[in-house]
Image: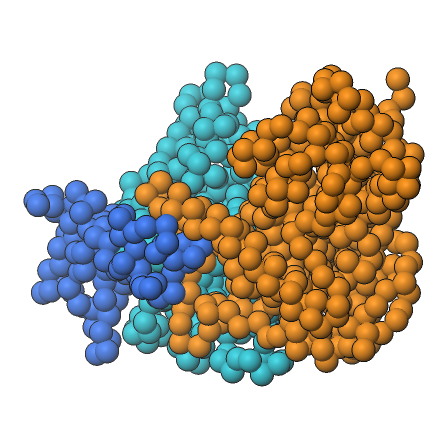
Chain colours: A blue, B orange, C cyan
Amino acid sequence: MSHLAKDMTPEVTWREITPGCNIFEAATSTVVETGDWRSMKPVIDWDKCKQCLLCAPVCPDMSIPVGADGKRGEFDYFFCKGCGICANACPFDAITMVKDEK
Amino acid sequence: MGIRERLSGNEAIAFAMKQINPDVMGAFPITPSTEIPQYFSTYVDNGEVDTEFIAVESEHSAMSTCIGAQAAGARSISATSSCGLIYMAEMLYVAASDRLPITLAVSCRALSGPININNDHSDIMSVRDAGWIMLYAETNQEAYDNYLQAMRIGEAVQLPIMICQDGFITSHAIENIELVETDQVKAFVGEYKPEHYLLKKDEPMAVGAYATPVYYIEAKRQQAQAMMDAKDVIKQVAAEFAEMTGRSYGLIEEFMMEDADEAVVIIGSSAGTAKEAVRQLRAQGKKVGLIKIRSIRPFPAEEIAQALKNVKSFAVMDKADSFNGHCGPMGAEVAAAMYANKVTEPKMINYIYGLGGRDVRVESIQHVFAELEKITASGETGETYRYLEVRE
Amino acid sequence: MAYNLKENLMKEDRLAGGHRMCAGCGSPIAVRTILRALNPEDKAVVCSATSCLEVSTFMYPYTAWKDSFIHNAFENAGATMSGVETAYKALKKRGKIDDTYKFIAFGGDGGTYDIGFQSLSGAMERGHDMVYVCYDNEAYMNTGIQRSSSTPHFADTTTTPAGTVIPGKLQQKKNLTKIMVAHGVPYVAQTTFVGNFKDISEKAHKAIYTPGAAFLNVMAPCPRGWRYPSEQLMEVTKKAVETCVWPLYEVIEGKYQLSYTPKNKLPVEEYLKMQGRFAHMFKPGNEWMIEQVQQEVDRNWEELQKLCSL
């Protein structure tokens, strides 16, 4: 019997549900798109970004990835909820919050 | 060969724990189970076991540590009584829901108030729906034997298990007992090998989910199945235990029930007293018998109904009240068992007895049989919700 | 090793996206920062008290945790983690596991200062090798912003509403950090999010790698409960530090040490005025409330400075 989180759909039966509602994997939340909560969206101006990285640790949603080169990448809009902390934390005004048109 | 000894019920439980040498014990003292963690911490401090003992600051934390430890992959135990048991009640539900086969020894005692340190069953009856398997012992020997069987049962169905005995009456009284050799105990109980646990290599695990209405009832239905499945497991483990020791146990014990017209249904040490009453009445030619419930959870509904189907009247003896205005907890469950199994002929009454350590004598039970005899003769039960030997 | 923001951020986050904490919540920032303080080769078991954090990070079947995780109840993260840590000792001793694990429990202020206080106290006193982290957002936010013993003086909450007769919470905030110091544990620290996160990251690393019990109190603002625009989180924490409402310090083996002394200690208004929960204090006639809070902050700050000079 599968004990994989992906199989614990809303149709899962009592015989198949994982015992105790326990999950035997890491980070199964990554399929949950919290980006659709967003009304404002951060946009980065790469010309202004100095890669100081002060925006990255303040993100509550792990949406500012820092790569192996030690540089931040594009926002992860799948998770970003648009709180705007990063925009305020940026000393160079490189991040602007704009209305998120979906 | 067994070892002949003389031990109190608490000491017998502690000795079984020592023989098993579990991974973790979290416990807090409360009369009358205090001796169990006392004995056990002595074993720990003298190196007779290598269990990690956590002297917690409350029973709530005792069960919380057991939940953490068992979820982490450790065989975990505790012991408690009375207010301690219901202080951990919230955690008892979590332990069962998380499907953690923790073993808890309970030396049963009345609940406050008024505060009282003596035996009745109000503590365990108040947590009977927490999802734990519950076995109840009549004697010190049974307490020991049940404890040796507990982990096999709980671990097989992934449910926690309580091993109950009467506080003071068996927990503190010294009786002859036959112990099993430690190597045999270890072989019988075996190693704890959970499929999933927090510390499992390369498999992170998450325990204690928030389940929305989409999932909650499926989880509960699965948990209910584990309790149903426990009935067969209890019987299988008892059969293996009987092979090893010659002492056999069922979900219930029937005593002189073959041709009985009147019967009592009873739990714990009072069953011993009641058996003596039955013997004496049998000697007088009266067709009386007794059913002792060993497994309170899972509740042996079918077995009890079958055992009672040919009696004319019976009394369910409750050492706790439900304060529902019409019966005690076992009274309600036995009545439900009879109806569900279509056994509706026998007349039933329910006695609340022995609360807060009130002595139960052979004559007390003989009085119950005398009342049953009247009911059989008249066909009238009269008041079904009765208090035994309360001063009027 | 000296702290370096870039190197810190190149470590993998151990909390995953897809959790359902509110936009701008301080709690996941605390969690991911503290978990990044683990040495990457070390495993961890994380515990959370029932809280916003717990219901948002493990709504079945979605766990946001990369490490093993256990939630038990509201009031017993301390005891639950005591059990896990003890199991680790037992299984390690018996040769059943060989990995190195660290144990980190998280609770909100409700689960830490209040209902979980006894369980926490027991765990600290027994000295389990674990870190207990309070993400302190100064009220019961999960149930809708009710006061806790951590709620500051005069704050407007749903059980201490700023009314016409009673002006918000009548009691001062409990000083839990000092109570934890009184347990005699080897490491206690108070921190929050400032600048490049050096303060919180270093304290988290010390807490995790100090043998025995450690306690971290992290101010983790809640934009909903404190009523400030979510993007201002770093401004709010900065003002908390610069006004000495939330001083940064650590206590190592009983020795107090200030982590930061503001060059110009700002008046408390600078902090209070950012937040709707204190708005009633700025109404004409209520100046006394601000004065009183200023006196309380000054007294606490002086006491702390004295302790740090010992």
Q: Is residue B205 above or below residue B262?
A: below
Q: Quadrant of residue B105?
A: bottom right
Q: Quadrant of residue B242?
A: bottom right
Task: State the residue at coordinates (82%, 57%).
Answer: B140
Q: Nearer the viewer, residue B286 or B6?
A: B286
Q: Nearer the viewer, residue B380 or B216?
A: B380
Q: Is residue B125 left or right of residue B256?
A: left
Q: Quadrant of residue C296?
A: top right
- Quadrant where the C terminus of chain B is found in the figure: top right
Q: Is residue B37 left or right of residue B346?
A: right
Q: Is residue A37 above or below residue C166?
A: below
Q: Is residue C124 above or below residue B32?
A: below
- Quadrant where the N terminus of chain B is found in the figure: bottom right
Q: Is residue B170 visible?
A: yes
Q: Is residue C214 visible?
A: no
Percent from the top left, x then y, of residue B154?
Answer: 58, 60
Q: Nearer the viewer, residue C168 or B92?
A: B92
Task: State the residue at coordinates (72%, 26%).
Answer: B349
Q: Is residue A11 above or below residue B46?
A: above
